[in-house]
Image (tube, coloured by chain):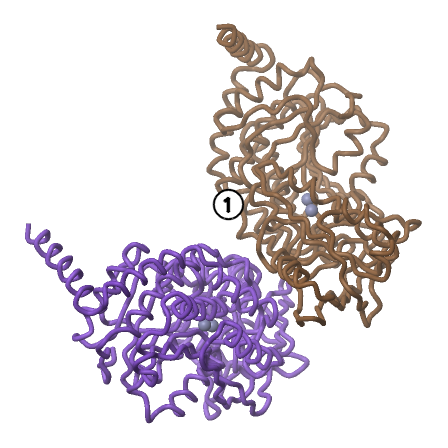
Chain colours: A brown, B purple
Amino acid sequence: MKKILLISLIMSLNVMAESDQFNPAFLQQLKVLRDQALDSQLAYEITESLTTEVGARLAGSPGDAKAVAWAQAKFKELGFDRVMTEPVPLKRWTRGQETARILSPFPHNLAITALGRTHPTPDEGITAEVVHFATLADLQAADKSEVAGKITFISERMVRSQDGSGYGKAVAGRGLTAQVTAAKGGVAAIIRSIGTDNNRTPHTGGARYDKDIPSVPAGAISNPDADLLVNMLKRNKPVTLQLKLTSHWDGDYTSQNVIGDMLGSEKPDEYIVIGCHLDSWDLGTGALDDAAGCGITMAAAKLIHDTIGPLKRTIRVVLWANEEYGISGAIAYHEAHKNELKQHILGGESDLGADKIYALGTRVAESALPTVDTMMSLLKPLDIEYAGNQGSSGADLIPMRRAGMAVFGLKQDASSYFDYHHTANDTLDKINPESMAQNVAAWIVVTALAAEADHDFGFGLSEE
Amino acid sequence: MKKILLISLIMSLNVMAESDQFNPAFLQQLKVLRDQALDSQLAYEITESLTTEVGARLAGSPGDAKAVAWAQAKFKELGFDRVMTEPVPLKRWTRGQETARILSPFPHNLAITALGRTHPTPDEGITAEVVHFATLADLQAADKSEVAGKITFISERMVRSQDGSGYGKAVAGRGLTAQVTAAKGGVAAIIRSIGTDNNRTPHTGGARYDKDIPSVPAGAISNPDADLLVNMLKRNKPVTLQLKLTSHWDGDYTSQNVIGDMLGSEKPDEYIVIGCHLDSWDLGTGALDDAAGCGITMAAAKLIHDTIGPLKRTIRVVLWANEEYGISGAIAYHEAHKNELKQHILGGESDLGADKIYALGTRVAESALPTVDTMMSLLKPLDIEYAGNQGSSGADLIPMRRAGMAVFGLKQDASSYFDYHHTANDTLDKINPESMAQNVAAWIVVTALAAEADHDFGFGLSEE
Ligand SMILES: [Zn+2]
Ligand SMILES: [Zn+2]
Ligand SMILES: [Zn+2]
Ligand SMILES: [Zn+2]
């Protein structure tokens, strides 16, 4: 009975929230647009354009400059009111040759890819015996004598889940193994790919890097290759591996954040910041990671603008540079805009593929929660639940969120995302246009309500 | 009503067939073994052994000789009564470098693999404009002026089905495109991989080869790359491709068919021939194609021998050499045994992966159909239906079948087989041990009943 009363109370609050905060005609327009967006192909078309006309775009590579040019042209073509680039300095890391071959007891070629920012092997490679650890913790606990002179191998497998939480658990190995191995006198490190698939397409990704901390060459082998290696090691004969990973640091480079603004009619200097990262790893065409996020957020801003017209605040779509190995674009933007951070009213980034959104999380002031209720009343028909006010957002919003900006996260079903993430398999065919359109509808709801709200969403919120 | 009578009649015929042809104690033993086989890991263990300790084993490669040594040792370890090798001469084809890069309008690296037995490009590659055809028939119908000087591209996609029939439909393009392209003055040929997946793991496979017919270098690009190329071509700008496929013919080589016999107690010179092909393509570890077939048939013979003991006829397990680019082992065996073909009473090959068997097809004399009924009565509990007496078997039985040998086929569910077939993704993890055990149970039933039957299965049967 109490529950029913509470639900009734919440429902009437929702109705009040709608009627109090927003013009009913605007809310009606927004609902119509939300439903129209479910039939829109625009996000998919933008994603197809970026992956086909640019493709792989590792920060500092020729694809990086092509992507920046593409983004400027695309924002203009879509009719954004203001298109800008802002310089992003970065240290360039370049992939080289990458091969791994078991020499004995049973010769095999393994599918391997270097981890971003790791040291190169000599051109002739490194040949050494493999020492196997089930987890990073086991490697950390190992005696130096077990590791010295060896190639370490961590075989922990990432667990599949809707919220992608298996990634956070397994990815520590990717980040730290090169440094931990070096500290114990190992000569190189390999890990089982941080991924949920069974394809011979290894998963790259950044390793921690600090020029003052010793490190070794490090790569990820595909899940089937990790299975093979585990099975071979079970035979209790020494396994000798030859590893060539000739990546290298390649000097300074200046990339660009590319920004498209749909200007606000009343408060053009207040921003609802949405977007994606423009860079990708170099193995696939970066379709899920993160052309999809660009398609979704650019389409959301464009559809709001064309269908409802300018809202009170500016909708700013930022295509961030070099998220993958340094969140360089996020750092540069934060630095460049540090005197106007409070004009960044609410921020979100789409960076977990294109499958259906199942929840909204927020980190906003209590005073803004009635508007979150309104968002939820419009998101519920899209099968989206509220995930509470302890939410986070994408990696590119970390610097501004830490500085106090309010954020939201539209959580996508990540069940299959880590089958493809950071692999050669991250290509357009992995995107379901219908699921992607549901994303656009949800981003339209949150973005438009934030841009039209009469209040801010708080600043200086506590960190989790 | 008529239907019910017919079913009753068939059922009583089945019972009669059982009681007439075979000793009831033997049939009881066979049923128990069939059910025990569902819990056996032996086939999986054999497959794990071949894929781990040998791995890729392209005919003529170092893996070929390793596989032959492995097979002899494994037959002996399993207690086969007689282990033999028979020489198989072949012309060796060796894969080289394989890269494909779109140079304009939008640079991309494509995942490509050379088709077996095709011509090499020069070391510096071939650079030419791409001309697109939806199907092989469209290429065949094209005017020479459309093709001359160009790289042809066939984009037809294989359709997924339980019986794998989409393969036969699409594979003609793989076989013929190099010759058809050459005849029209094209400089190279690429096809969409003959596969049902969306992975960046292109599917190799043999192309037709005749030293007197002009041909060109030819490769298959992965499905996602084919999608990309199709999307790029839709933009109606010339697409320029640089292709390097430096495969080559590499002289004469002698491989071996490896034969394991479980000798018959009454008619040791009459053979029930089962088996698999021992060679594989070089991209994966040849787990589904065809280590699985070796595991299934070796385990079936071993379990019959160990549990029931010797049957009347010899069970001969042949691990065929070089099925993939020439059925060389099949040709050599047929030649070597042509004076004793009639002693080959019934033959079958397991060569379509390891998923569940759903049907038995036969091509036997009418007089042997009562024994087929008995087979079916023991296969039905495994969810296996009868597919009629117009059946076929694996590629390695083609020469003997054409010469008149009776054959059977235990049809596996091939729905996912062509996701992995002939790719780097053909690895052990694609095998479900439970489905594989069902295969072993079915092979035990058919093999044991054929070996124990008092009659033959016919010879000189009409070809389809
Ligand atoms: Zn990302
Ligand atoms: Zn990423
Ligand atoms: Zn095969
Ligand atoms: Zn094959």
Give the crowd class for mark 1: few <14, some 14-19, many >=20 residues within 10 Å.
Answer: few
In the rendered structure, the answer to whether residue B432 lies left or right of residue A90 reads left
Residue A161 picture location, percent across and down: 58, 39
The residue shown at (45%, 63%) is: B418
Which quadrant, please, contains the C terminus of chain A?
top right
| Residue B145 at least partly seen | no
Q: Give the residue number, with chain letter if any, for mark 1.
A: A432
Give how far across and how far down residue A38 sits, in percent.
48, 35
- Whether A43 is drawn above or below B432: the answer is above
Q: Amino acid at mark 1?
A: Asn
**Residue B214 visible, this angle:** yes
Please tell me which residue lies in front, B19 or B159: B19
The one nearer the camera, A69 or B260, is: B260
Q: Horizontal and vertical percent for residue B225?
A: 56, 62
Q: Quadrant of residue A398?
A: top right
**Residue at the spot x=59%, y=85% of the render?**
B248
**Element at badge 1?**
loop
